[in-house]
Every structure is written in structure tokens, then in C-alpha cells.
Image (spheres, helix red, strand yellow):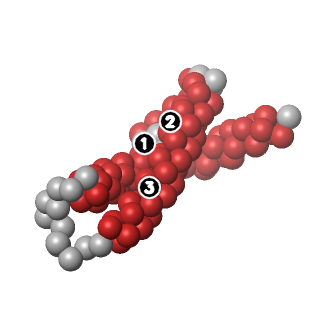
Amino acid sequence: MVHIDNELYELKISLELNRREFSRWQNYLDGDDGDLAKHQTFLTALHKQKQLKGVIKELDQRVEKLEKERKEIIQLIDKFNGLNQRILKLKYVEGLTLESIAEETGYSYSYIKSKHAELMRIINFTKKV
């Protein structure tokens, strides 16, 4: 989950930068040169705008996919309770290692490791069904 959150953050920054760039080129096409060099041609502006639309569309799709994955992970974790849910939250939401989870919960590393493996078997089995 931490990986998804980090990637979402980076994608959203990239989206904002690309949208700003798109706006600059749109302003150029609308007759307001703004900070763009005056030697830019209309065709260059159209090409750049088309390119940016594609980049923005791809970034939007990736953000949507990651947000959906994040929601599905949280819904899956919420189906568990007690220690099982805590292990999954600490591992996939907080990004802790199994060693850290063992320290956090007060259980041995080998117990947490086997419990995590059991949870993964359950999750993988339910995905197949």
C-alpha cells in the first residue's frame, strides 16, 4: 500500500505539471503567448497539445487504476479481523516488514511469518474461486 500511495503522489504531481504545460500551450493557441517563445508555430503548439493530452490521459488512467487497487486492498483487509487483520494492515498499509510486525505485535517472527503465509494462501485461494 505504501508503494501505491507513493506512486499515486508522484502521478498526481506529474498530472499537475502536465496540465499546467497543456494550459500554457492552450493559451498560446488562444493568442496569448505568455511565457512561450514567439517563434513557436501554430503546428508546434497543436502537436505539443496533442502530446500532452495523451500523457494526461495515461496518467489519469494510472491514477484511477492505483486508487481502485488501493480500495480493493483495504476492502480485502477489512474482511479479516483480530491479529490477521492487524498483520495485513501493518504489512500492506503501513509497509512494515514481518520482523517489524513481530516486534509490534509481541509475537515471534516465525509465528508472524507462518501466519502471513497462511493469510496469503487464503487470499490466493479466494482469488481463484
User: Looking at the picture, which amino acid does disc 2 mark?
Assistant: Lys
Judging by the rendered image, the residue that carries numbered circle 2 is 89
Mark 3 and 1 residues: CB-CB less than 8 Å, in contact? no
Instruction: Pick the residue in front: 64 or 46.
Output: 46
Q: Secondary structure at mark 1?
A: loop
Indicate the amino acid at tag 1.
Glu
Point out the frontmost of discs 2 and 3: 3
Tell me if I can see residue 115 in this picture.
Answer: yes
**Quick check: 13 left or right of 85?**
left
Residue 107 seen anywhere in this rendered image of the structure: no
Q: Residues within 10 Å of mark 2 (few under 14, many from 20)?
A: many
Judge the density around disc 1: few (<14), some (14-19), many (≥20) Cα neighbours within 10 Å.
Answer: few
- Residue 112 in the image, given as x and y percentages of width and height: 58, 43
Residue 92 percent across, percent down from the top left: 51, 43
Q: Of residues 27 and 3, which is closer to you in this image?
A: 27
Q: Which residue is mark 3?
A: 53
Asked whether 22 or 116 is in front, the reply is 22
* Amino acid carrying mark 3 in the image: Lys
Q: Earlier in the sequence, mark 3 or mark 1?
A: 3
Q: Earlier in the sequence, mark 2 or mark 3?
A: 3
Q: Position of residue 88 (x, y in %)?
A: 56, 37
Please tell me whether residue 101 is drawn above or below residue 84 in the rendered image: below
